[in-house]
Amino acid sequence: MTDKTTNNTDHRTENADNLAQNENMDEALSEVLNSDDSRAGSDLPESNDDEIEKLEAEIAELKDKHLRMVAEFDNFRRRNAKERIELTQTAGKDIISSLLVVLDDVDRASKQLDTTTDITVLKEGISLVFNKFRNIMQQKGLKAMDAVNKEFDADLHEAITEIPAPNPKMVGKVIDVVEAGYYLNDKLIRHAKVVVGK
């Protein structure tokens, strides 16, 4: 029992010593902090001036970078808008240039109509001009839609009218094409206007 009492007394004594040391440390720390505050007042202006100058220089550099980036982006936007306008103005230049050859042939054919009386020669010439025109359009990616005898498809065809089907197999199918549909590079650019059997 005396051992336990002695141990308890020892622990209490240690705790009291620890508390006293902690209080002494707290007092010392507060003294140091108070003295640092009074000293810091005299040191701060010099170090703060240097830091302020550095920060101001950094801010000026960042502002300069920001202004340059804004100006560069604005120039890019203007240049891009100008290129877009030029592109839309000259988008058909390639096709028009290739069709000038056909236009020349049409002019020559028109002159021949006034001087030639041979209808066979005129038909031949006109046929050559049409074939040249079709070939140029095909080279540019134009393809006519094959619609006759196909099922009516609202995504591809525009029904002009319905007529009685000549036979039961033609019900709901395209009987005649009034205006051909076209694809440009496999993209539909004009719906076919068709007559549908009912």
Image: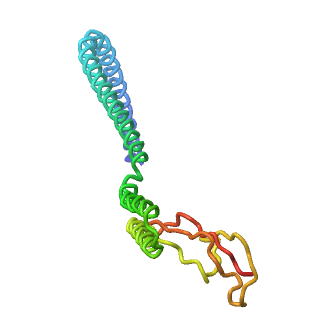
Q: Is residue 179 above or below residue 46?
A: below
Please give the name of the residue rendered at 29% of the width and 22% of the height, measured from the top-left corner.
Answer: 60
Q: Is residue 23 left or right of residue 154?
A: left
Q: Is residue 37 left or right of residue 185?
A: left
* Quadrant (top left, top right, bottom left, bottom right) of the C terminus: bottom right
Q: Nearer the viewer, residue 166 or 15?
A: 166
> Percent x, y for residue 109?
42, 63
Please give the name of the residue rendered at 52% of the width and 68% of the height, measured from the top-left corner.
Answer: 182
Figure quadrant of residue 29: top left
Residue 40 visible, this orientation: yes
> Percent x, y for residue 56?
29, 19
Residue 155 visible, this orientation: no
Q: Nearer the viewer, residue 62 or 88?
A: 88
Please give the name of the residue rendered at 31% of the width and 20% of the height, measured from the top-left corner.
Answer: 28
> Percent x, y for residue 64?
29, 25
Please tell me how many numbered marks the rendered image carries.
0
Q: Is residue 81 left or right of residue 28?
A: right
Q: Is residue 40 left or right of residue 126?
A: left
Q: Is residue 27 above or below residue 4?
A: above
Q: Is residue 67 above or below residue 121?
A: above
> Percent x, y for residue 84?
41, 44
Q: Nearer the viewer, residue 84 or 101?
A: 101
Figure quadrant of residue 137: bottom left
